[in-house]
Image (tube, coloured by chain):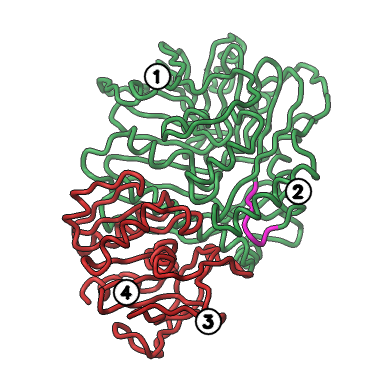
Chain colours: A green, B red
Amino acid sequence: MNKQTQLAEIHHSGKPYIIYKSNKGFDLYTNFSKKIILNNKNVTNFLNKKYKNKQKNTDLFIGFFGYELLNNLINIKIPHQKNINFPKGIFYKPEKKIKISHKLTYKSEDIFKKSKFKININKNAYARIFNKFKKKIKGGETYQIKICTKYKIKSKINPLDFFSRLSQTNLAPEAFMIRDKNYSIISCSPENLISKKGTYISTKPIAGTVKKTKNLNKIKALKYFKKNIKETKEHNMIVDMERNDLSRICKVGSVKLIKQKIVEEYKDLFHYVSLIKGKLKKNTKNIDIIKAMMPGGSVIGCPKINTLNLLNNQEKENRNIYTGSFGYIKFNGDMRFNIIIRSILNFKNISEISVASGVVVDSNARNEFNENYIKAKALIDLYK
Amino acid sequence: MIYVIDHKDSFTHNVVHQFSLFDNVECDDFSKINKSKLQKASTIVFSPGPGSPRDYPLSSKIYKKLKGKKRIIGICLGFQQILFCEGANITEQNKIYHGFQSKVIVNKLSKLFKPGNEFKVGRYHSLKLKEPFKAKNFDITMRCAISGAAMSFENNIDKIYGFQFHPESFLTINGKLLIKKILSA
């Protein structure tokens, strides 16, 4: 059977499945034999439990950690927030994996009912928060902090149709989708947080975004980033922070900056990216790695702990999946995790898209507010 | 053994890795300091961190107790912490340096580094030392090439050293060498 037809068939059967971008195309995981809904009590057990390697390509758990769970794992409490009671994390054990080596071509026949997006923080409210955080930077309480805004829309969506269209226009290296009975996630995340193979680990932080225009190609984008002191400083900070997080779990002298400040191209924007690698200390457990690296620093700010506390006290709504991590843990201990950004969470027929941009001392509220919109645009366009 | 006192910073483990090139390093949160490690250590390092020295009375207490007895090193907030304990005023600066690479110059007062030497360093500080500042045996030995802000001090009598910039940052050229010198001074 053709893989696209097979995919459409799985989709129409109504059973849960996951698609994750692979090197050559996509991997589809389905026939889940286990579904583990994570909470503060069972997460440690889940991460420490050892499973027998059966030499199958489905010897893994695939799923996500939400933002709140990752905070709680490093002993950061989140004050009471508006909450849609979406699970804090879910992992699945697949029994079937299908490799899809070409583009996704699925198209929904249904007519899509349009409605309008609502944003949870308007320009003025954003500016107020922005100025408050700028004062905190002046006092040294944080060096960089990311303000999150959320777009919401009520609509019934066909996640596969959305994901296919998104991956045609905006193929991101960490793209994924989850379709389960009562929710779906569609993501074009560009950012890898953890790639662990054997005793080696790497992370690929993104810091720096510029809107694509007719006159701005990749080479010019690099020039723009290099000249732009604000983007450069923001990026430097993230590089040192990720070096730090890797240093917690890696051997002395092994943490190295492999790629320094390169440009990656996407549909609507360019990103400024680095790659850092290290060799794990002996007997490092996966839970230690997750606690050291998550939530990913580039989407939080710096220093991590104080900045998380500042953010959590400011934000009135639960971030749910946003700035959590999606990926898999293989039975042999290897892992791949992204940072959940550029994502749609559709739960009970309400979609939410969260975005954030950084306040550093010389950023300006209007620019950052607009940067948030640029980041959300590729996703918002799917609803047209 | 070197004992790093962590002020919950996201750069502390870069510091740990850099010092680990020269000796065994232990690192604990400033609020969970282990007395026997503190006793065993030959060198105490006050890490970078958010906020101002006023926020860390426990670290000030350790400094005052161990001054003259052990080698003490401060980085960024740690630099300010030591100077604050020596009576300095730590203030906000107009221009803030976070993730900024800038040039520093060694001056004549330095006994460890060659006066006139210039090199590139990574900076992450909102606050700075307010000058004039005077304390017995303390000399400001490096300054920002542009603003003149204090970037390092030496107290070679009591073996106390500090950097306002981050020797462990990838933005600092030859940071390892700086650490080697103050550890062997």
Characterize the local packing of mark 2: few (<14), some (14-19) or many (20 or more) Cα atoms within 10 angstroms. Answer: some
How far, Cα to Cα, is label 3 from label 4?
Answer: 20 Å
What residue range appears in magenta? A357-363
The extreme left residue here reads: B40
Residue behind mark 3: B148
Mark seen at residue A118: none
How far, Cα to Cα, is label 2 from label 3?
Answer: 34 Å
Q: Secondary structure at mark 4?
A: helix
Q: Is residue A161 above or below residue A15?
A: below
The quarter in which the C terminus of chain A is drawn is top right
Mark seen at residue A127: 2
How far, Cα to Cα, is label 3 from label 1?
Answer: 53 Å
Q: Left or right: where does residue A92 sit relative to residue A152?
A: left
Mark 3 or mark 4, earlier in chain: 3
Label 4 close to label 2 by CB (< 8 Å): no
Q: Nearer the viewer, mark 3 or mark 1?
A: 3
Which amino acid type corresponds to the residue marked 2 in the rendered image? Ala
Q: Is residue B170 above or below residue A160?
A: below
Chain holding disc 2: A
Residue behind mark 1: A41
A317 drawn magenta: no
Residue B129 point in image, percent of width and height: 50, 72
Q: Secondary structure at mark 2?
A: helix
